[in-house]
Image (cartoon, rainbow, N blue to C red):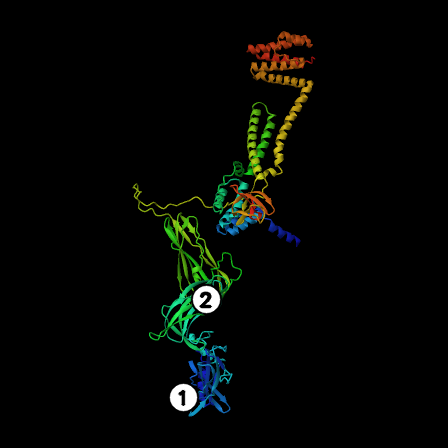
Amino acid sequence: MKRTGNQLAPAFALCFFAATPALADVEFYQSVDRDQVGLEDSFHLTIVASGAAEDAQIQFPSSSDFEVLSRSQSTQMSYQLGGSGASFNRTQKFVLVMRAKKVGTLILPSAVMTTSGKTYRTEPLKVSVKPGRLPGPIAGRPKRGVQVPDPFRGFPFPDEPFGSDESDQEESIPFRGTREEADVFLRASVDKQEVYAGDQVTLSLHILSRVDVSGVDSVTLPKLDGFWSEDIESPTQLSGEQKLINGVPYRAFLLKRLALFPVKPGTLKISSAEADITTGFIFTGRRVHRVSNELTVQAKPLPPGAPSGFSNSSVGKWRLSAEVSQAQVELGQPVTVKVSIEGRGNLKNIALPSLRGPAGLRIYDPTTTDKLSPAHGRIAGKRTQEYLVMAQQTGLFTFSALSLQYFDPQTEVYEEATAEPVSVAVVPAKGGAIAVGGDRSHLPSEPKNVLPAGGARPLRYRASFQGEQEPIWRAAFFLPSLLGPPAVWLGLILFGLVRSRFNQQDEGSVRRRRTRAAHRRLARADALKASGTAEAFYAEVEKALREFLEVRLGVPIIGLTRTVLAERLDQAGVPEEQRVRILQVLDACDQARFAPGGNGGQRDWVLAQVQIVMMDRWK
Amino acid sequence: MIHLFWLSLLSQSYYTPLEAQEIFRRAGEAYYREDYTGAKQEYLKLLSHGYGGSDVLYNLGTACLNQGELGDAVLYLERARRDEGNSPDIEANLAIAKSRQLDQVMGSSEDPFIERLANAVRQRAIGIAFVVAWGLAFLTLSLSRFLSGGRRLMARTIAVALLLFAVANGSLLMIRAYVRRTYTDGVVTAKALQAREFPQDAGRVSFEIHSGLKVRVLESSGKYLRLRLPNGLEGWTQAEGISII
């Protein structure tokens, strides 16, 4: 409650004692906030008494045509300095919430105040009562200054000195039920009419009653199509709290409180809830069926610009973490990795990023545990996924860093929660005390450093770059390389053929060539004279001489007898002296071949004879 | 000013070999950070600037494989195989990619021997070996004409051996050229493609194929390609979702 007058109370008190003020003039009047009401409506009667003594007696209007639903009172003290000196003013204000009992033009009688031996009466008020309900001013608030001046207008404090007293508790509910239904009814309410899809809206279901409620059963909750719902509060016992509804005091009993998360954008409807309510007690109890109001919630789409990997269920405010149970573990022993997400939002629907690790670790499917801890009507808590990881290889293994993209509806921006990478060192298992040479078959098999095949092959570390590859047979060099070598080879063959052809046609050149060959053989014989064997020497000499004679005679001489040869030489016009030399040389060669052992002087002589023969220009 | 403009333009469109190696290294680092998208972008950057080759293609295919892009993974690994021939790492990763495919082609037989042979050879190496052996064989034959006796015999023996080697390589090259000229293979890179009975949108859908499937392209008609699956199943499908190897 806020009492504005109290803020300056010390100053007033000081003034009060500094001067002895007189009481101001007495004012006493009453007003209603509306002069036309429905039979189902409530209205406010405000009675103001100003300048009355502290012991003033006030009687409120009493009429069988009206019932008083509630009454509230406030007092205001003021101190004024005027021409006639200081004056002290005390103002009391009474607000009565009333309801008419019958239709027609009804008279609200005068209020009566007795103070300082005097009696004051207010003017009676005329109220026109119609059947049903009538639209009017917001109920619960007196319509000031319509019929009478506001006594606090111009007062140097906030504009609504009395209004603030009731604002914290008083609610306005458009209620369209009958007069009887207004005594006890079901009310569904949401804390927000417009939220982002995935953000929480809290639905509360209350029984509001002006009569005693002894029990509730057959509660049918509203249909929540388009929402993901989580239970926040479900009281097992009825526990009421005081509330002012349209100025009328009610007891509010919470039946259910749910956290709703729209799963898609759009206008989502929350249908009516129903309940059977028992009022009164054992003998006076009565069971009534009540249906709550319907609600709509506007779910806004998330703003554009969502990062890649964002899931629509990740709305709220989250913190991600990862921890490993042991930093070092023996090969074959399990290790637990906990991935946790903590914060507020739809915890049950949020998808944690999967734990990924190197190939040497076998990661089993996780177990998920949720710990909800709603605070102030908001779903919050912690979801933990525990992965059992079995190391199959030794080494230091690092699990990848985890990240979760989410949308924070409070800041209206996309954010990222990250968990740092965690590592575990896997060391070889200790062998233990195993007896050397003993039978080990009964012992459990030792964990091995498993190096399985498979998995994608690693990248290549070095690159030899190549442009877009044309097939090699389309390369410019390919055809010349294919045709060139055989062409050269064929060219050489042709050249040889042509040359030999030319050589065959020119007899003189053949003779010259063979003569040169004979001279070459003679030169080789000369070389063999000193170093070679007699057989080789004489063979060369004979070949040289025969070659020479065949060129000169134009016929082969091999196989000719000495006689025939002599005749041929004679026919060829070889002088007698030369013929003898030739025959002697040939005889010497035959002799050396068939009777080896000739001396070196014989070789000189034979060589000289042949040279003489071959140097002679006969024919 | 104009010089500066051209300089900046050239610097963006051209990488020196050292810069290309640096990008290649950076891509590898991104891959091992499990940033497969980043690695893929770097490899594509190299390809777009003319720095291709089987190493880049293999790494790109492997990055796509880890990223879960089966179509691109099979495409680039097949291209790496086309350039390099059969290689253990290419074959291994291709086998993984194929094992993850959605399509299981029933009744498919192994590729004909001639195709397997053509795919197994490294065309560039075979081509160069052929050209060198061919040239040396005829050079040796030519030289042998100027030799005599035992040298000539030896030279001719070497020439015949070289010629046999060249003919063997040339045959492989011819097979490769024939296969390449005769057959066109492609990979489904779209997530899913409908194969129709004839090349029109109104054609009845015969079957559906999914990313990563290797198909033979038989002919084209407008925006449609006629495909044949390894088991002989044929259909017309939109060319957009097929990438030629």
Left or right: where A57 falls relative to B3: left
Q: Do the residues labelled 1 and 2 touch (CB within 8 Å)?
A: no
Q: Position of residue A589 (x, y in %)?
A: 59, 11
How many numbered circles are shown? 2
Q: Residue at x 42, y 92 (%)?
A: A117
Q: Is residue B69 above or below residue A116?
A: above
Q: Which mark is residue A606?
A: none
Callout 2: few (<14), some (14-19), or many (20+) C-alpha neighbours within 10 Å? some
Q: Which residue is drawn at 45% across and 70% down?
A: A293
Judge whether residue A231 can be spotted in this image: yes
Q: Are the numbered discs 1 and 2 placed on the same chain, yes or no?
A: yes
Q: Is residue A117 above or below residue A5?
A: below
The residue that mark 1 highlights is A55
Residue type, label 1: Asp
The residue that mark 2 highlights is A271
Q: Regarding mark 1 in the picture, which secondary structure is present there?
A: loop
Q: Residue at x 30, y 41 (%)?
A: A439
| CA–CA distance in space, label 1 to label 2 | 54 Å
Callout 1: few (<14), some (14-19), or many (20+) C-alpha neighbours within 10 Å? few
